[in-house]
Image (cartoon, grey):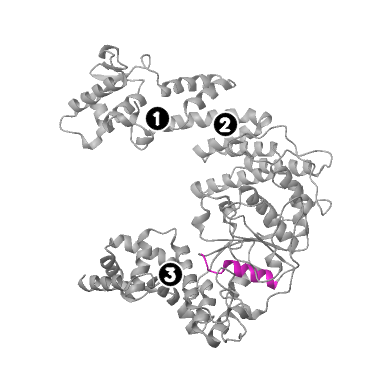
Amino acid sequence: MTGDDLPRRARQVLGVLAARHDRVQSKDALADAVWGVDLPGNATAALEHYVSVLRRALQPGVPTARSFIVTRAGGYVFATDRARLDLAELRAAAKVAERRPGQLDVRERIVELAPELPFVEDEYADWAAPARAEVKAVLVAALLDLAEPAAAVDPARALRLAREATELEPFTERGYRLAMVAGAALGRADEVVRWFDLCRRALADDLGIAPSADTTSLRDRLLAELNTAAARPVESAPNGDRRRGGDRRKADRRAAAATSDAGESSTAEPVERRLAVVREAGREPGTEAGREHSREAGGEISRQAAGGAEDAAGFVGRRGELAALRDGPGVVHVVGPAGAGKSALLGRLRDEAPERVGLGRGPGPGGALRLGWLRTALHQLGRPADRTLDAAMHERRTLHPAELDAIAAELGGCVVAVDDAEHLDADSVSELRWLRERGVRVVVSYRYPSAIADRPLHALDADLVLRLDPLGERDLPVEVLQASGGIPALVAAAGGAAGGAAGGAAGGATAGAAGGATGAAAGGGTGGGTGRATGEAAGWDPAIAEAVAMHLARQRTRWMPPAAWEILRLTAALGTLRVEQLAAAGGLDLDEVLAAVDRLVHAHLLVEGPGGSVRHRSDLIRSAVAAQISAAHGHHLRDRLATA
């Protein structure tokens, strides 16, 4: 039998008795703990009933006189000599640990007894909260007491123990310090930096304080020691492999001495914070250099020759954003939904300053060879480091500090941009942070801040976040703006639909034989907000334009609740509607409609009008969605709206 087989109140009675096993609980005190202000009319009888249920269910056939729930002095007590109780054993072990500071087996037993904090079902109850806090304090102390000696002999385990302790108690600096020491023992300067930053953010965000001088000086000392060790050509640094699938790192695994294609490593003087660039999935920059793909096989890389910058007519808008990326702060995050032109913006940045900007691409959700983004950026900048990257890939490790310092020394004043950076792993983010600390500017792009909340990229603090809004009337002709809604991925299709010179002006295109040739097809990159001109794209087929629009709408709504798509359908079929009309026509709850409308407006699919009304931003998307609604269904919706 499991606890789930017991009635809810019976589980609570058992929990109170377990939490307070060291003293008798009167029936009044027990009832008050279980029911609080919601005491039933005959609480004593109800309590006696649940005690009887517990005795029969947990010790079937055992007489009441021998039950572990002992009746005593008009109340009950959990007799730990009649039934084993992990909490009682943990409390006893904690007392032993307090008396014997160096006895590690006692601490191992504490960790074994507390795989998780107790009383999860009632964690905020008055009777459960003190016991949970007690167990947490004992468990954190045990984890850290075990991590401290392990740092010298098994640093991978020490790092895991410190991580568990800081997850339980994020404000204990001792845990972060031990994690830094363990990371240094593994030869991982990036881990030292990462754990110090985690400590700094935890203390600053919740307590408004900075790490202590001891923690800061420890970080500086460990980094200095690692830099010194990495600079010695005779010595080897510990391999940087991470634990995978729960396996521990072999403590005796060593990497080859840190080398660099650039020769002796050097550390750049501290500079103001800068930034790294990320490109959007599915977008190929317009230049030949932008079409480079890094292929890591046998240490070889195949890439196309770099070409000249694209003609300025192929890109409109985004001048302020380009200026911020080119001359702005150290780390910039570029965000926006699918089709917002993130990749095109980064591609244009690369086109305008090919000698200063290297543009790589993140691995995407399917994963990729880890250092492909850096290899591509370095080749574009004419500063390849293939031997260093090949060695790290072969040994499946992160780049050593000396290797990163050598790369950074070659990149002084440059920008490393990573497109579609959302899925970068922790090692790549640490390497970006290290390059940034050495003066390399960094720019990354991804969909939304929420998309990286639980990903390693969240640790790359932004000096500036650029959210790409749709293009406006200053950027596009009115016909193209109305058709596309200013959504960059639709501008080429909208230009073709509008035809003639309007399409050519919108996409920055040169007129094709059919007139009104527009930018590249959807899925290819759109310029700062527009398509690139191609003669083959003249005169978009309306069916293709609608397919592009439908795909974009699906991409932007796939993370939204079903009501969002229904609202797109309703506004496509019925035109401009107020939120209460949407609720009536769709049979939806008003709060549900409001929540979905907020998301659709934020995703630039709907625009708001007077009186709480909303309509489609893009005529192309409206037409594509409306085409999915039969005439009979549309007639039914209009009738429902008229009678609402």
Foreground tag (2 vs 3):
3
Q: Quadrant of the N terminus?
A: top left
Q: Which residue is at the front of the view, 521 or 386?
A: 521
SS state under label 3? loop
Q: Which residues are magenta?
A: 338-352
The structure residue drawn at horizontal position 77% and vertical position 56%, both measured from the top left corner, is 409
Residue at which label 2 appears: 144
User: Does 347 lie within the magenta span?
Assistant: yes
Residue at which label 1 appears: 131
What is the magenta segment's predominant secondary structure?
Answer: helix
Among numbered discs 1 and 3, the one appearing first in the sequence = 1
Q: Are there few (<14), some (14-19), or many (20+) residues within 10 Å of tag 1?
A: many
Q: Is residue 283 above or below residue 173?
A: below
Identified by mark 3, the residue type is Leu
Q: Determine if residue 588 is in view.
A: yes
Residue at which label 3 appears: 605
Identified by mark 1, the residue type is Ala
Residue 310 appears at what percent x and percent y?
68, 76
Foreground tag (1 vs 3):
3
